């Protein structure tokens, strides 16, 4: 039996030097392979020591699934703990950022660059060097806040690569409803990822995110396959890692139950 391990890699990010990427591989037998979840904000997903705001405890969630007989997963966390985070996880091609001075940290969207880093650097490296199953049904993307927006963007931009997306407290409020509607319409394809949308409403920011998520869910309900769309709302939850760590195990369970 090969013991569980958390690996730290440094991979070249466009024009910003090397980027820390953490890869958790659960205990496994020689030759055993797992579905894989790629995640934004890797500094927050594995342990409290590397996190400023709290931890998702993803390793514990994987271990619980294995103990329950569902199976394990490799978790890949891409670090976004930097001054560029907000722009890094904001795609410009969805539309112009709205919201005035409140959104001043989102004025130079670079989400497409982050998307390219995941698709062209991180994903190929992980598939070559770690025991992961390939194919869209075994591959998911997950993130929260701006990372939830980025998860939504990347999964819908590459439906041939991702079979599921965890879209937690997504920053949909950065865009006008008309721009979001136009972008969603442009992404519809014969094969689409399973979308797990989650939001709370327990503080001012999360309540506004709830309202924008409801609007996007209504858009999707009109054009997206019903069996590939799920929305979870926990009204008391605030905009923080404690809430996302609470909902992640359910997303992980749902993804693993649908994997091949």
Image: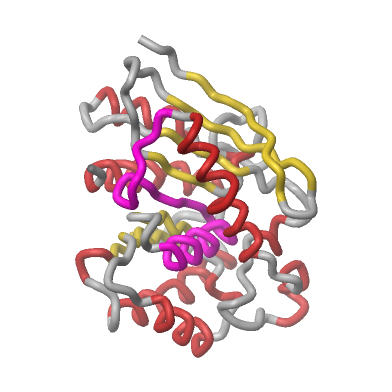
Q: Is residue 176 shown to the viewer in this render? A: yes
Residue 199 falls left or right of residue 232? right
Which residue does the image show at 49% across and 59% down from the upper left?
Answer: 151
- Residue 201 vs residue 61, the one in the foreground: 61
Quadrant in which the N terminus appears: top left
Q: Nearer the viewer, residue 144 or 227?
A: 227
Residue 255, magenta (yes or no): no
Q: Residue furthest top?
A: 1
- The vertical placement of 254 against 113, above or below, is above
How has the structure been colored for display?
secondary structure
- Residue at 59% across, 66% down: 205
Residue 202 seen by the camera: no
Vertical arrangement, residue 103 with respect to residue 35, above or below? below
Residue 19 position in % (x across, y down): 71, 42
Report the quarter where the C terminus lies.
top left
| Residue under the point 41% across and 76% down | 187
Q: Quadrant of residue 252 in the image?
A: top left
Report x, y in % for residue 40: 57, 49
Residue 217 place in picture, x, y as percent = 36, 74
Q: Is residue 145 magenta?
A: yes
Residue sitting farthest toward the bottom: 178
Residue 12 vs residue 218: left or right?
Answer: right
Residue shown at the point (77%, 72%) measured from the top left: 104
Question: Magenta residues?
Answer: 131-158
Residue 56 left/right relative to 9: left
Q: Position of residue 34 (x, y in %)?
A: 34, 32
Q: Locate residue 109 relative to residue 1 in the image: left or right.
A: right
Q: Nearer the viewer, residue 147 or 233?
A: 147
From what the image shows, is residue 250 above or below residue 208?
above
């Amino acid at each position: 039996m090969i013991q569980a391990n958390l690996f730290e890699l440094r991979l070249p990010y466009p024009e910003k030097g090397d980027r820390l990427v953490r890869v958790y591989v659960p205990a496994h037998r020689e030759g055993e392979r797992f579905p894989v979840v790629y995640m934004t904000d890797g500094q927050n997903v594995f342990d409290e020591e590397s996190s400023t705001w709290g931890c998702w405890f993803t390793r514990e969630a994987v271990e619980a699934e294995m103990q329950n007989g569902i199976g394990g997963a490799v978790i890949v966390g891409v670090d976004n703990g930097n001054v560029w985070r907000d722009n890094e996880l904001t795609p410009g091609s969805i539309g112009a950022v709205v919201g005035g001075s409140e959104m001043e940290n989102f004025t130079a969207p670079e989400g497409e660059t982050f998307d390219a880093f995941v698709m062209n650097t991180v994903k190929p490296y992980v598939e070559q060097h770690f025991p992961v199953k390939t194919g869209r049904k075994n591959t998911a993307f997950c993130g929260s806040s701006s990372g939830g927006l980025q998860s939504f963007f990347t999964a819908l931009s590459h439906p041939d690569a991702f079979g599921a997306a965890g879209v937690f407290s997504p920053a949909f409020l950065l865009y006008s409803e008309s721009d979001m509607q136009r972008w969603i319409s442009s992404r519809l394809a014969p094969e689409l990822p399973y979308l797990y949308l989650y939001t709370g409403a327990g503080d001012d920011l999360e309540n506004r995110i709830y309202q924008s998520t409801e609007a996007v869910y209504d858009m999707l309900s009109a054009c997206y396959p019903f069996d590939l769309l799920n929305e979870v709302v926990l009204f008391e939850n605030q905009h923080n890692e404690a809430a996302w760590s609470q909902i992640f195990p359910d997303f992980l369970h749902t993804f693993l139950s649908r994997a091949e």
